[in-house]
Image: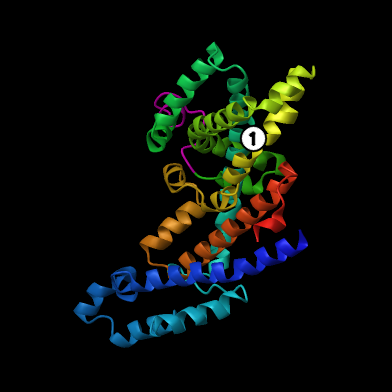
Amino acid sequence: MKKYLVKRILLIVPTLLGITFITYMMIRLAPGDYTKLKMGMEGALKSGSISKEILEQEKKLYGLDKPIIVGYFDWLAKSARLDFGISRKDGRPVWDRVWDALPITLTLNIISMIIIYIISIPMGIISAVKKESAFDRGSSLVLFILYSLPTFWVGLLLLLYLGSGEYLNLFPLGGFRSDWAAEAGLFTRILDVGWHLVLPVATLTYGGFAFLSRYTRANMLEVINQQYIMTARAKGLSEKKVVFVHAFRNSLIPLITLMATLLPGLLGGSVIVESIFSVPGMGMLAFEAILSRDIPVIMAIETIAALLTLAGILIADLSYALADPRIRLEAKI
């Protein structure tokens, strides 16, 4: 196990370097001059109100005057010290902008993921055990109807009917907390954040129920039909023990693979949901950075997302051995 872990960690380094270099190269080679586009400088340059010296200083500040390979290694040397530079949009340190948005996105997505898994996995297990029953068919119909509804449409409907005041005014129209909450007590602040998150969480979760529950159902059906499950039942084991100890544990491998994508998903956030509900999370930060050609912020978000993706894959590989002792990690190398 230790040998395998060391090899995988060493493999993460060149993979991360490759991902960040390709990202940096794509940003630099993308059409358009970032410096001229920033704050409408191109029109000002044509009118003569901004000199070329100012534009050259802007390029030099962010390393855009250097060749791509030189600029990348300069960025790499700084990021190794956790210095991702200054945001081109507002002049703030990139880490400050990331750490302002990260807790919001983590709170929103962790709550959504917990709700999805708590509801979907038991529903998938019950549907597999009671295949072709009324519950199986009814839940499949409802879940696939929910899955087919567009996220932006559901979000706008929730705002219209539950937050606009035209029908009901139960929840705020957007944001993460109320202006007055900063002076309130801890319990009141928690309730205020929860009040603001009800509609975004509902919009994020409804579509995930169908996918995960059907995924769990398909895995369980494949395992339940195996010979050793029939043998366990023939030995007189209770149905609960057969399902949860023997069947469910052996159906965990595909679910663990799916869970490997959770870490970057928690960071990335949802651009659509955060835009609709004006939630200042990582999704909105990444979207705004792309629109404003904010290279330092884009590189920071991409680096963190790539690192979390690689970490998620490593955790999934290690979890395989815990779920199924027959898997030997050393044999993979």
Residue 154 in the image: state x and y as whole percent. 41, 32
Foreground residue, 329 or 194?
329
Query: In screen coordinates, is 233 left or right of 252?
Result: right
Q: Which quadrant would residue 235 be assigned to in this image?
A: top right
Q: Nearer the viewer, residue 65 or 314?
A: 314
Q: Residue at x 71, y 44 (%)?
A: 186
Based on the picture, tell me whether residue 166 belongs to the magenta stretch.
Answer: yes
Taking depth in this image into account, of 256 and 181 the one nearest to the observer is: 256
| Quadrant where the image shows the N terminus | bottom right
Foreground residue, 6 or 117? 6
Q: Residue at x 50, y 51 (%)?
A: 280
The rendered magenta stretch, by its main secondary structure, is classed as loop
**Residue that appears at 57% across and 56% down:** 309
Q: Position of residue 120 (x, y in %)?
A: 59, 30
Which quadrant: the C terminus? bottom right
Residue matched to label 1:
251
Q: On the picture, is 199 further left or further right than 188? A: left
* Magenta span of residues: 160-174
Residue 75 lies, with reference to residue 219, above or below; the image says below
Magenta region includes residue 228: no
- Residue 315 seen in this snapshot: yes
Q: Residue furthest right?
A: 236
Query: Callout 1: helix, strand or loop?
Result: loop
Q: What is the crowding at mark 1: few (fewer than 14 residues within 10 Å), some, or many (at least 20)?
A: many
Where residue 314 sits: x, y (%)?
65, 56
